Image (cartoon, grey):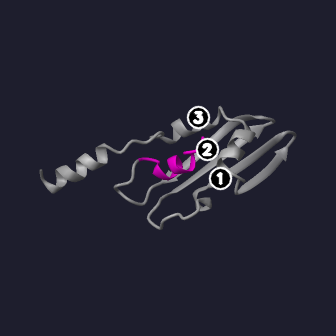
Amino acid sequence: MSMFGLVAASCTTTNSRFVTADEVSDYLIKQNPEALHQALGEPRTVENIGGNRSVWTYHSDMIQNKKATQGKCEMIITFEGEKAINVDVSATEYSPFAAPLATCNQMLDSL
């Protein structure tokens, strides 16, 4: 097997729970604040935007023991009361060998 074949084979065998930002958004919008807080810990920021609405921001720089080669993931979740009403996910992987959304998947492992 050629070197290219080995690299291609190793890349195709990587499984990710979430492959697109939309998949992450669709999953997180079904979660309540308590479940997210329990799984992800304290948000990086919480902003009350009026009434019973709040915006929680989680960022991959909150990952303990994060490697320099890991990418970044930011999840911004807007809650109205106990219901998520909007989720924005931004992700970038720094390694060409990383699975899609590998850093976001790592953050969401416990959910």
Relative image position of residue 43 (x, y in whole percent): 71, 53
Residue at image x 61%, y 44%?
88
Q: Is residue 109 magenta?
A: yes
Query: For the residues carrying marks 3 and 2, which lies nearer the camera in this image?
Result: 3
Residue at image x 81%, y 36%?
81
Say left or right for 4 vs 76: left
Relative image position of residue 16 (x, y in whole percent): 43, 42
What's the CA distance linking mark 2 and mark 1? 11 Å
Q: Is residue 17 above or below residue 91?
A: above
Please tell me how crowded label 1 is: few (under 14), some (14-19), or many (20+) other residues with Cα within 10 Å. Answer: many
- Disc sitting over residue 88 in the figure: 2
Callout 2, which amino acid? Answer: Asp
Query: For the residues carrying marks 2 and 1, which lies nearer the camera in this image?
Result: 1
Please tell me how crowded label 3 is: few (under 14), some (14-19), or many (20+) other residues with Cα within 10 Å. Answer: few
Identify residue for label 1: 58
Relative image position of residue 4 (x, y in whole percent): 18, 53
- Disc sitting over residue 27 in the figure: 3
Q: Is residue 35 above or below residue 48?
A: above
What's the CA distance linking mark 3 and mark 1? 15 Å
- For this rendering, which residue is in front, 109 or 93? 109
Dot 2: element = strand
Which residue range is magenta in the image? 100-111
Please tell me how crowded label 2 is: few (under 14), some (14-19), or many (20+) other residues with Cα within 10 Å. Answer: some
- For this rendering, which residue is in front, 34 or 98? 34
The mark that comes first in sequence, 2 or 1, is: 1
Callout 1, which amino acid? Answer: Tyr
Residue extending furthest toward the bottom = 68
Task: Tell me the quadrant of the picture where the C terminus can be found.
Answer: top right
Pointer 2 and pointer 1: residues touching (CB < 8 Å)?
no
